[in-house]
Amino acid sequence: MTKLNRRKALGLIGATATIPLIARPAFASNHSISVGALRFTSHAASFVAFERGYFTDEGLDVDFRFFQAAQPMAVAIASKDIDYAVTAISGGLISLAEKGAAKVIGGALSEEVGIDGQKILVSDAAFQAGITHPSMLDGKSFAVTQSGSSFHYMGATMAAKEGISLSYKPLQKVGVIIGALKTGQVDAWSIVPHIAKPLAGSGAVHIVGNVSDYIPNYQVTTVFTSADNAANERSKTEAFLRAFSKGADDFNAALVDKTAGEDAADEMVRLVHKYVYTDRTFEKAKPSIVNGAMRLNSGAALNMSSVKNQLDWFKSEKLVKDSITMDTLVDSSYVESI
């Protein structure tokens, strides 16, 4: 986990948040919070809110803490090492919610018809051996960060719909998975398009399917916090969601709906590039960021049906307790349900 601390946010422009909390005043002046993130384009709402001063406008002084997988982020929320985070629902997050340590409070990245989404990839070795469609992966290895991760959920849902069996290989970190896929140590994986497309373009891996074909309207990532924050720090939590929502609106307008104009799109890519593909030049990073833009839920609205489907799968696989309910996992009082 690495830490980025930047006190001075830049800019004061952006779209109006759509969550119903917008009319309320800023939380407080210079209230420090830590926000967990991955260096993915899908986390852009937080980056935009930081860079354009939306967190500052709400009286929030943000430190980013960067992770390489979802479950460690959930643990950091439960231990209060971080205050808010955006990542996929995992078995670890659900179990922490069952213990009264974490709550989902909103939605972030989602699959949407008409917008290019997450891809199913196979190694070049698997492709050369004739695997050109997910249905041909029976008995093959599928990379996951951990058992009970969103990668596990995506792979298992695809396998069930295709009537095949997969061998899941936990590799802990996304970077390790990429290396294993490139070298043929694992056969398949699923990941967001800004990572999938450049990998496929290199020829080292191949795209053979879309996650949306198996999980339509998938709520890929959620906004979550500690149960204590959700229950007892309402003003702070509302302030975070207002700023986050403004960042999502700006991102969607610039790179998803493309209604903000070419200059705004270029500015957005440059902003995101400060956090994503930082080891590449802007020119090399730009196509991946642009082509990998997926919908970030307006107003941090949460697809409750998708979340329930995910919870039901985790329970069916005995990865979490069968007694856990949606009320255990989600505080639905903060944002609209879709």
Image (tube, rainbow, N blue to C red):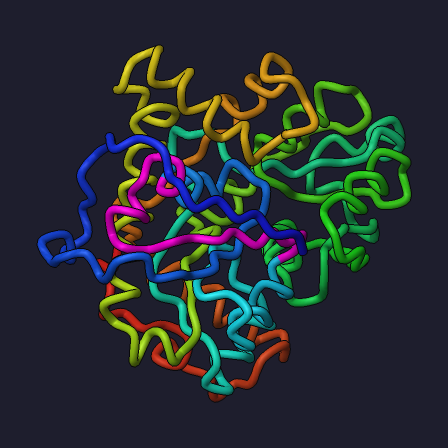
**Rendered residue at 51%/74% (across/down):** 80
Residue 56 is covered by the magenta coloring: yes
For image coordinates 59% across by 42% down, the residue present is: 39
Q: Quadrant of residue 228?
A: bottom left
Looking at the picture, tell me which residue is in the foreground, 66 or 96: 66
Q: Position of residue 315 (x, y in %)?
A: 55, 77
Instruction: Tell me: 254 left or right of 123.
Output: left
Where residue 255 sits in the image (x, y, percent)? 39, 24
Q: x%, y% of residue 75?
A: 59, 72
Rendered position, 4 above or below 255 = below
Q: Residue at 57% across / 75% down in the picture? A: 316
Which residues are the magenta region? 49-69
Q: Is residue 237 visible?
A: yes
- In the rendered view, does 329 fall on the left or right side of 36? left
Question: Residue 290: percent from the left, percent from the top?
Answer: 49, 22
In the drawing, does residue 17 fall left or right of residue 277?
Answer: left
Q: Is residue 272 above or below residue 326?
A: above
Q: Is residue 229 above or below residue 73?
A: below
Question: Is residue 218 highlighted in magenta?
Answer: no
Dividing the picture into quadrants, the one containing residue 260 is top left
The N terminus is located in which quarter?
bottom right
